[in-house]
Image (cartoon, coloured by chain):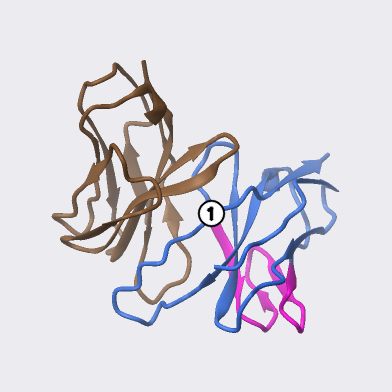
Amino acid sequence: DAKTTQPPSMDCAEGRAANLPCNHSTISGNEYVYWYRQIHSQGPQYIIHGLKNNETNEMASLIITEDRKSSTLILPHATLRDTAVYYCIVRVEAVLLQGSARQLTFGSGTQLTVLP
Amino acid sequence: EAQVTQNPRYLITVTGKKLTVTCSQNMNHEYMSWYRQDPGLGLRQIYYSMNVEVTDKGDVPEGYKVSRKEKRNFPLILESPSPNQTSLYFCASRKQGVYGYTFGSGTRLTVV
């Protein structure tokens, strides 16, 4: 799995968009970008994933650059409850293969603090 | 409610006393996994299971055992706990064909 680099911490004002960057310059063509978050000592929570197209769901948007070497997770209207550590993970996703066993490798992540 | 349930949430035990941390999911997920989380080391996988009776080692399996006799349950067994197994443990599950994992709320284990 490709290595990812994230800033260790970021602040964001409540109600504003939070843009969390992730560099994955060694990503290969069949690797997906995943984002999870972990609110203090709770279990990690899946947010979104993508391969090369931008993705949006009810939680966030994921913007992947055309060369796929970096991506940005966008929380459009951050709230205090979005304060968490955000993990960017790159991995091959063999979801459709029987017996796929590759598991998640979490790095250090970005501590996002949403300020009132 | 669809969830992964771990028990207990908190446990303090003594060195060498066998213990089991239970994990149960009600979503009919094929894949289940155990992680431990330690300061500065992030989340590390202990064991995983692709389905009933199919388990394999993760990155840090030493000192742990697992079993998958039923699809919904994936207990983590510490036969002889040691202080270096003091950690925050998470169980996670995923359905084949679905991308995101669902994590339990965690078990904070202290071995003295």
Q: Which residue is pictured at 77% across the width and 51% down the height?
A: A7
Q: Which residue is mark 1?
A: A45
| Residue A94 visible here | yes
Q: Position of residue B28 (x, y in %)?
A: 27, 64
Q: Start and end of the magenta stretch?
A: A46-71
Q: Position of residue B86 (x, y in %)?
A: 41, 27
Q: Is residue A60 magenta?
A: yes
Tally of numbered discs: 1
* Chain to which the residue tagged by mark 1 belongs: A
In the figure, is residue A95 to the left or right of A27?
left
| Residue A74 visible here | no
- Of helix, strand and loop, which one carries label 1? strand
In the figure, is residue A103 to the left or right of B7?
right
Query: Badge 1 local density, few (<14 within 10 Å), some, or many (20+)?
Result: some
Name which residue type carries label 1.
Gln
Q: Position of residue B58 (x, y in %)?
A: 36, 53
Q: Quadrant of the N terminus of chain A?
A: bottom right
In-front residue for pair A14/B4: B4
Q: Is residue A22 magenta?
A: no
Q: Is residue B55 above or below residue B62?
A: below
Tell me what hue chain A is rendered in: blue
Tell me what hue chain B is rendered in: brown
Q: Which residue is pictured at 63% across the width and 67% down the height?
A: A58
Q: Which residue is pictured at 73% across the width and 74% down the height?
A: A69
In-front residue for pair A5/B75: A5
Q: Which residue is pictured at 42% across the width and 73% down the height?
A: B98
In-front residue for pair A21/A48: A21
